[in-house]
Image (tube, rainbow, N blue to C red):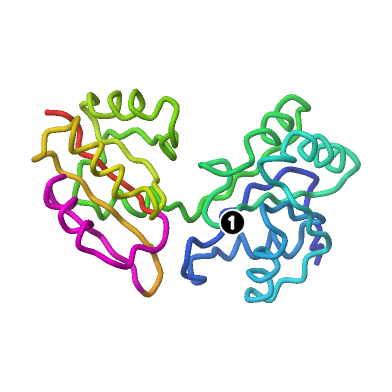
Amino acid sequence: MDNSLAPALYIVPTPIGNLEDITFRAVRILKQCDIIACEDTRTASKLLKLLNIEPKLLVSYFEHNERARASELIDKIKTGKSVALISEAGTPVISDPGWAVVQEAIANNIEIVSLPGASAFLTAIVASGIAADKFAFFGFPPHKKGRKTFLQKIAELDITAVMYESPYRIRKLLDELGEIVAPERKICLARELTKIYEEYIRGSIAEVKEFIQNKSNLKGEFVVILEGKK
């Protein structure tokens, strides 16, 4: 049986928490590929060890070396190597590095094999109770410059808006939304998805804001799902 992979860029989602969410296909690709490009080699090594995968070669691929590393990876594929791209958790490119190497692969007519799998915002929106037939995903809001304009645009949408926010800024985000959005607008916060302490906080902006203000232990990134403007 031939266990080699065809030369290509393989985009491989990894679990956002629960290891059971890895697919059989993802495990096979990670076992067979020549190179695994990842955001943090230490984190990736721990995951691969838990999955009983011994990588042939592990290389870092993160925000600050993305452009240079993308060219290197494409050169490797041109020589007949197979490259799997993973992020810290979830699906690469979605609020994670990966866009540059995908663009390089397209420009060089290299095959891209994108595997379906875990994604925090999709996991959250389907359980939020807020309309999911039409929605827009915005990633993380800007920390400072452009943040107010960013949130004002989201507030005016007539479809569901989905974004991420850190536990250190979630209270600030709710305060800001409370100032520019009708307080009865529905919102859902999801955190620690697929993990032991998974939590969904649903209600109006006013209700969720009050709940969060009284909560002492906020850990894990939040998925924020905001109902569209009526």
Depth check, front residue: 38 or 34: 38
Q: Which residue is drawn at 38% across and 48% down?
A: 121
Q: Where is residue 224 in the image (x, y as percent from the top left)?
A: 31, 46
Rendering quarter of residue 34: bottom right
- Residue 102 placement (x, y as % from top left): 67, 35
In this picture, residue 2 sits left or right of residue 126 = right
Regarding mark 1 in the picture, which secondary structure is present there? loop
Lateral position of residue 76 relative to residue 138, left or right: right
Residue 205 location (% of width, % of height): 16, 45
Residue at 26%, 55% (x, y): give it.
127
Comparing 112 with 205, the one in front is: 205
Q: Is residue 201 magenta?
A: yes
Three-letter amino acid code at disc 1? Glu
> Image quadrant for the C terminus?
top left
Range covered by the magenta-colored residues: 197-221
The residue beneath circle 1 is 88
- Residue 117 versus residue 204: which sits nearer the camera? 204
Q: How crowded is mark 1: few (under 14 residues within 10 Å), some or many (20 or more)?
A: many
Q: Is residue 113 above or below residue 146?
A: below
Q: How many numbered marks have been drawn onto this rendered protein structure?
A: 1
